[in-house]
Image: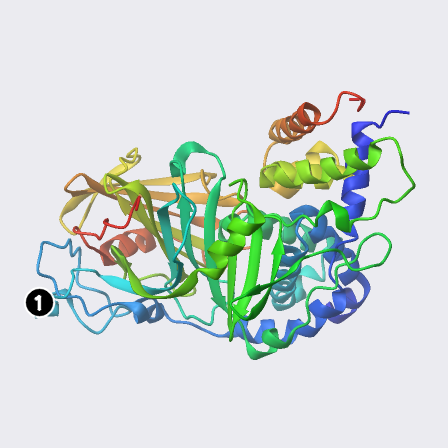
Amino acid sequence: MNPDIDDLIRDAVRRQEELAVDPERILTALPARTARRRRTFTVAAITAVAVAAAVTVPVVILREPSAGGPATSPTSQTSTDALPPAVASAPLRYRPTWLPAGFVERSRSVPVSDPALPKVTTDRLWKRTSLDDGELGHLGLSVWDVSEDDTERPPPSLTGADGKPADRSAVDINGSSGRYDNDIVTWQVGHTKLMLYAPGAGLTKNEMLRVARSVRPDPASLRIPLRVNWLPDGVLGEFATMQGDSPAKWDSYVMAEGDARYAYVSFGPTVPDPRGDEIIVNGRTAHLASLDEDDPFWPNQRMHWLLTMDVGDGRYLTIRAGSAKYEQVPTPLVRDDVVRIAESVVLDQNPDLTWLGR
Amino acid sequence: MTFEEFVAARLGVLVRYATVVTWDPHLAEDITQDVLVRAQARWGRIGRLDAPEQYVKRMVVNEFLSWRRRKVAQVVLVPSVEGMTPHVPDGTGAVDDRDLTRRLIAGLPAKQRAAIALRYYEDLTDEQIGDFLGCRTGTVRSLLSRGLATLRAALPDRVRT
């Protein structure tokens, strides 16, 4: 009898269920995870990676930072030497020194909060085609730190339907034990985890391993072209991303969240659709809309505020803010929060775009 | 029910559920841990709900689909076919169909994959899935329809649709 697609799917989900890790592992790790989660962070942590920027070129300094911002005021950001006009930077940590032909770098993403925040990874992405083509086919490298406990954790106790361990090829990455699994290679260097992934990129196992084995520490940093000097209490910056296909087509943003609220602050040449009332932010015209709609980019986030502003040189600042759809929000973001975030943003109008598409 | 009682009784169910929703045991482990930490902090409220397990399961789906996970969610770990043992003896190609189905589901966009998991693993209605995914019933139908269309297009003709 020919199989029925419903039966096939039910069989698939049943077999997938069998791959679940041992619940005991989760139980064992829970206290450590809880401890990490309970750590408190201040908004100042966002600037922990910030460079004491020397402003030698017209950087849009929208406002003197609030009391929650860094100790230095914009007026103290004077030209002192040949330092680049970055407003913040963070180490990129690792990079592959070999890539298959055609892959160019399209995205860099770095933590902007306390490095101990779990699962805030440093990510780099290479792709043969445009980021916007909707296809996978990219090659990504994620790097994050794990605790000593994690280092000692046994490999996942995955089993097949017969109870035997499933095949997840063990590999050697420059002397470190790792695992190859379809389009993914993971390995660990000290307390640092590295994951190379290439969903849909069509790379062979040998190519994946060659890329993985070429990964070396990278002393370079990502110069983040925007810095958010103020966020509401409990909303913490998580990571900043700069991405694009070329120096002419790029975007940068800082993502922050906490207490079921989020704020996304982006800067780049993408022209936003101004909505809402005209307001003045640090002497510039902006638009601020009060909304109640699904965030177009983040599932299960409800967007309550949209602020857009032309910051000159064909570039724009956009702030989307709101709350998690299903969470109780003790202190929803209000209009003044969004305006104050906008006022606190410092932009670098001469961002380093040289690595995009290379 | 205390949080500890909930975990003792339902953790196994929860992690299996997360493994199906995410289609990735590693990500499921990670998400389950995160969700439990958050649930523990709010257990005073969650524990008083009529169906705390449903609430926590919805937290799992939200976490999976949330923007923080979106990059990771594109990465799906599918154990190699040769590592899997079929549930029943087979000589008809159905094993291939089953493996292919698993791989095809793994390749679906995250939201379609979650919708399929909720329908076929949890047996939820369109309305219930919509509640979990935070979208309208029509959107759920569209997600399921597109997901199934992808599977149908890629599966051999002998599979009855």
Vertical order, A341 against A11 (above or below): below
As rendered, which of A26 and B9 lies closer to the eye?
Answer: A26
Give the image quarter of residue A289: top left
Q: Residue B150: x percent and y percent?
A: 64, 27
Total marks shown come to 1
In-image side of B17 versus A293 (left or right): right
Q: Measuring 70% from the left and 32% from the top, which residue is drawn there?
A: B126
Amino acid type for the residue under numbered disc 1: Thr
Q: Residue A319: x percent and y percent?
A: 33, 47
Find disc 1 in the rendering and name its residue. Answer: A78
Q: Measuring 38% from the left and 60% from the top, which residue is drawn there?
A: A110
Q: Measuring 79% from the left and 47% from the top, which residue is drawn there?
A: A15
Vertical order, A115 against A136 (above or below): below
The chain letter under disc 1 is A
Q: Residue B155: x percent and y percent?
A: 72, 27
Q: Secondary structure at mark 1?
A: loop
The quarter of the picture where the N terminus of chain B appears is: bottom right
Q: Measuring 78% from the left and 35% from the top, which residue is drawn there?
A: B96
